Each structure stands twice: as C-alpha cells, then as structure tokens.
Image (cartoon, rainbow, N blue to C red):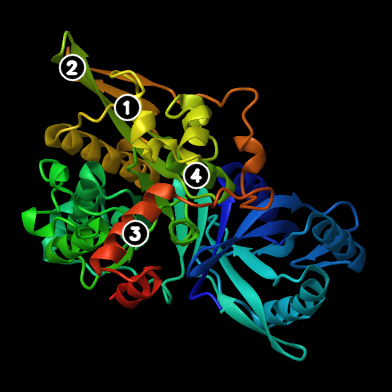
C-alpha cells in the first residue's frame, strides 16, 4: 500500500469542473470523471482527465444532490471501456478543505464496491468548496464488503499556476522560524506555506542542481527528493557547491543530502536520496512522488522523460541550460536559457531543448561510447561541456524564481515564458512560451500517465557507474537497500 495518496488535474479541467459544481444558487451539485493511476515509489496519485458531466435527468438538485442509476451505469461503462478508474465529485457551499457528512460517507461507501468490482481500481471521491478548494480521498477495500477512506495529502491543479490544496492534518502548515523570517516576509505567509509543503524533486545534482538544492534548503523547503546516479569526480570540483576533494568517488546525492541537512532552515526536513537515473524505474517512480521537478541534466534522454512526465503525470518541470560561445578558440559569450513546462505551456521538445534523434542515440548507448563521441566534430552540441561555477549560479537562481512564480504568482507574475540571458552584450530576451507545434502529442497525453506507453528503461551510463562502485566495494549492487535505508532519515 502506498505511504501517501494524492490527486492531480490540469488547470483547464479544474475550471470546467468548478464552473459546473460551484452553483450561484448555493446548492450542491455532482459529476463523475475518469482517472488513471500515477504510481510513484511511495505515493499513488489519481490523474483526473475525462469529465462525464450529468445530462438532463441524470441528477436531482434539492439543496443536496442525488444521481440516478442510469448515469452511474454510463460512467462505469466508459471506465471499463477505457481501462480507467471512476472519480465521484460533488460540491459544498463552504470554503476550504472539506470534510464529509455522514450522508457523504454513506453515498461514497455504497459506490466504492460497485466501482471497484467493475474497474479493479478504487473509487476516488472529491469535494470542492465554494472557493474552489479541493479535498479528496481513496476508498480502499479492506475485506468483504468493507471499504475504508484514505484521505489524500494534497490535490494539485497544474496550469499557468501550480495550485496545491493540502490536508492540514496530513501535511501541517510549517511553523514560522526566525531562520527564514526574511524569506517569509518577502513572499508572505500564505505563499510560503504553499512553497514549503511541496515535495520538490531535483533531477541531476551537478553544478546547477546542487545550487538549486542548497537554495531550496535555505528557503525553508521541507521535502526534497534528490535523483542522480553519478559520483563526484575531480573535474566536478570547480563547479559543485556540495563537494570537496574528500568527496571524490562519493555519490552526488549523498553529498547533496549532507549539505542540505547542514544549511536547511526548516525544522527536520525530509531529504530523500535516489541514486538512479530518472530513466530507470527507481528514479522515475521517485520523480512521480514529487509535486514539481527541477530538470538539471544536460542529456537529451532524461529531458525527454521529464518532458513527458510534465504532461502525462501532471508534474510541472523547471528546466534550464547553459551554452558557452567561443570564437577563434577564445571565450566570446554565454547564454542561459530556462523555461517551465506543463499543461498549457510549450513542451521542451517544441522549445528546441532536445532533439528526438539524440534521445534515440543516447538510448542506444552511443553517448557513453568514447569512440562515438571522439568521431563527432569538436563543436558538436553533444560534446559541449564548458560550464563554470558563475554560470551555474546565475541559472540556478533564475530557476528558483520560476518555481516561485508558478506557485505564488508573486508580483503578479505567473509565467516568465522562455527566458534567455545573454552575458555578452548583457541583455535579456523574453518570449512567450506559446503553444506546441501542430504535430506535438503533449496535449493528448495530459493526465493519462503511462496509460499509452512508458519511457522507463535501462540507462547504460548509470549501469557503468554502479559497476565502478561495486568493484570498489562502496555500494550494494542494486543500491535499493542503501537508498531505502537512508531515505527521509
């Protein structure tokens, strides 16, 4: 059984459901929707994607609201046909996270058995308050005809903003501490409470990712997931804030976790280290436990994976990269580009961040083949690796501010679009992210998880690193026991 449950839906679907459920006459209303599971390592998320709104005669509104059996039958047939679960949604004329009346509990318990028997997935119940705040629960079969309620810790709505409604009992508001007083004063108590309770993942703990991790720790974030299979090497030391010469050969996630715990301003932050690639199942599932991700990798294949995750699993991604320019063998400038991707935003592929052909090249193991790389031209984009610490500092800070904008809308900014900073001649290009290309499939993937296909596979580079470590006797061959033993401790 998962440690935690949650629900996620896209912003446009949230608006459509709220327009139907929140009535101007103050009465309750209801609807059904289909959902697909997003199975993280520790969290099960119901991805709501297909609304089935009531038609004439499907329900009776009389202060409270009731549906007729024909409506439920139509919903269950659709769920069985699509291989999806059923979500029952209704409204309450009160603000905030909603509890359940005895009538609510009885109605959903009656539904739970029918839905589970027909779909082999638990019923998900959702309630929306008059202010648009969602609450949610799963109904778990515990034996016979008995179903028990499992409250969700959060419901996230992913659109222009990342709007997360938390169950205060399961995810309490963080107490205010003098250590991060200035951070709270800048963003405000409510915005800080939203930021601090997010589960944020960092994919890649190199020069940029390690700085992002430290910044989040100092801001008072309480839940971080660190995903990186690699170890610290000598050439990393001029670019990584988390490592010294004594750390050469150590896993980057271990160095990052140790640094975070030293500088964190939140009390007892939960820092989970995952020594795998996001392409591998262990890293992929850990990423699905997150509410938002920082993509701090420079290879095309992991970028394609998180790109799909932003839409299919409704986990928005803040991504950035650095391009150093040379002329006649001398430094002539550097650009930093960053963007946030997810439903309603242009994807990484359409933004030109990675080439699908390079994804296939990496999956075949060629980017880990020295002979292949040696044969590429010296200025080939797959061989560029000129990043230095000041460049990483700039990009990391800008990525943090993209997350802040997406979660808080501070200063009226919800999206910066695509930002490109040009060190020479010292200008900033900002352009609206725009829509994806006409042939892009991201819009069709929104909220469907891995229902149509999965990108999990082998990462040859990660395998090589683990083989090196195994030969040195530093980690277990699978890494799973070590990863779990130190997680969240």
In space, the residues marked 4 and 3 are separated at their CA atoms by 24 Å
Which residue is found at the position 27% from the left and 43% from the top? 400
Front disc: 4 or 3: 3
First of labels 3, 2 by sequence position? 2
* Left or right of 489, for residue 304: right
Q: Which mark is residue 305?
A: 4
Q: Is residue 363 above or below residue 321?
A: below
Q: Is residue 358 above or below residue 473?
A: above
First of labels 4, 3 by sequence position? 4
Q: How crowded is the residue under tag 1: few (<14 C-alpha within 10 Å), some, or many (20+)?
A: few
Q: Quadrant of the C terminus?
A: bottom left
In space, the residues marked 2 and 4 are separated at their CA atoms by 30 Å
Which residue was labeled with disc 1?
374
Q: Nearer the viewer, residue 360 or 483?
A: 360
In space, the residues marked 1 and 3 are separated at their CA atoms by 23 Å
Which residue was labeled with disc 3?
467
Which residue is found at the position 30% from the left and 65% from the top? 470
Front disc: 4 or 1: 1
Return the x and y of residue 47 as percentages of the image width and height: 61, 56
First of labels 4, 1 by sequence position? 4
Front disc: 2 or 1: 1
Q: Nearer the viewer, residue 384 or 96?
A: 384
The residue tagged with tag 1: helix, strand or loop?
Answer: helix
Q: Is residue 426 above or below residue 229?
A: above
Q: Quadrant of residue 446?
A: top right
* Left or right of 104, for residue 188: left
Return the x and y of residue 46 as percentages of the image width and height: 61, 61
Which residue was labeled with disc 2?
333
First of labels 2, 4 by sequence position? 4
Q: Nearer the viewer, residue 113 or 242?
A: 242
């Amino acid at each position: 059984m998962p440690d935690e449950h949650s629900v996620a839906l896209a912003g446009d679907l949230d608006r459509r459901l709220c327009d139907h459920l929140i009535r101007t006459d103050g009465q309750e209303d209801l609807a059904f929707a289909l959902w697909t599971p997003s199975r993280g390592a520790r969290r099960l998320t119901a991805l709501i994607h297909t609304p089935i709104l009531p038609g004439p005669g499907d329900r009776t509104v009389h202060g409270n609201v009731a549906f007729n059996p024909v409506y439920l039958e139509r919903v269950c047939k659709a769920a069985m046909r699509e291989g999806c679960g059923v979500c029952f949604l209704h409204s309450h004329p009160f603000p905030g996270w909603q509890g359940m009346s005895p009538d609510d509990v009885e109605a959903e318990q009656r539904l739970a058995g029918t839905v589970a028997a027909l779909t082999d997935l638990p019923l998900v119940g959702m309630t929306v308050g008059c202010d648009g705040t969602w609450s949610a629960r799963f109904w778990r079969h515990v034996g016979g005809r008995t179903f028990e309620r499992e409250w969700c810790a959060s419901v996230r709505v992913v659109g222009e903003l990342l709007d997360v409604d938390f169950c205060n009992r399961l995810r309490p508001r963080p107490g205010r501490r003098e250590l991060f007083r200035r951070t709270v004063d800048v963003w405000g108590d409510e915005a800080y409470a939203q930021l601090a309770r997010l589960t944020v993942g960092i994919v890649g703990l190199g020069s940029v990712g390690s700085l992002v991790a430290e910044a989040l720790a100092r801001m008072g974030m309480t839940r971080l997931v660190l995903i990186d299979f690699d170890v610290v090497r000598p050439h990393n030391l001029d670019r990584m804030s988390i490592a010294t010469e004594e750390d050469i050969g150590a896993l980057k996630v271990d160095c990052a976790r140790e640094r975070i715990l030293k500088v964190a301003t939140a009390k007892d932050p939960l820092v989970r280290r995952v020594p795998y690639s996001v392409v591998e199942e262990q890293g992929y599932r850990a990423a699905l436990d997150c509410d938002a991700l920082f993509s701090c990798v420079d290879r095309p294949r992991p970028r394609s994976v998180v790109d799909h995750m932003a839409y299919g699993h409704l986990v928005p991604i803040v991504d950035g990269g650095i391009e150093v320019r040379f002329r006649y063998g001398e430094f002539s400038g550097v650009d930093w580009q960053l963007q946030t991707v997810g439903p309603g935003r242009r994807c990484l592929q359409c933004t030109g961040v990675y080439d699908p052909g390079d994804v296939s090249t990496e999956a075949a193991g060629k980017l880990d083949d020295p002979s292949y790389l040696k044969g590429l031209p010296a200025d080939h984009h797959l061989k560029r690796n000129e990043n230095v610490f000041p460049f990483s500092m700039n990009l990391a800070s800008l990525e943090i501010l993209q997350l802040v904008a997406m979660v808080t809308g501070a200063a009226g900014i919800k999206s910066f679009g695509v930002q490109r900073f040009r060190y020479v001649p010292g200008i900033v290009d900002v352009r609206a992210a725009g829509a994806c290309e006409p042939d892009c499939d991201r819009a069709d993937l929104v909220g469907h998880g891995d229902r149509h296909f999965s990108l999990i596979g082998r990462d040859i580079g990660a395998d090589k690193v683990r083989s090196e470590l195994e030969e040195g006797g530093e980690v277990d061959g699978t890494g799973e026991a070590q990863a779990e033993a130190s997680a969240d401790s």
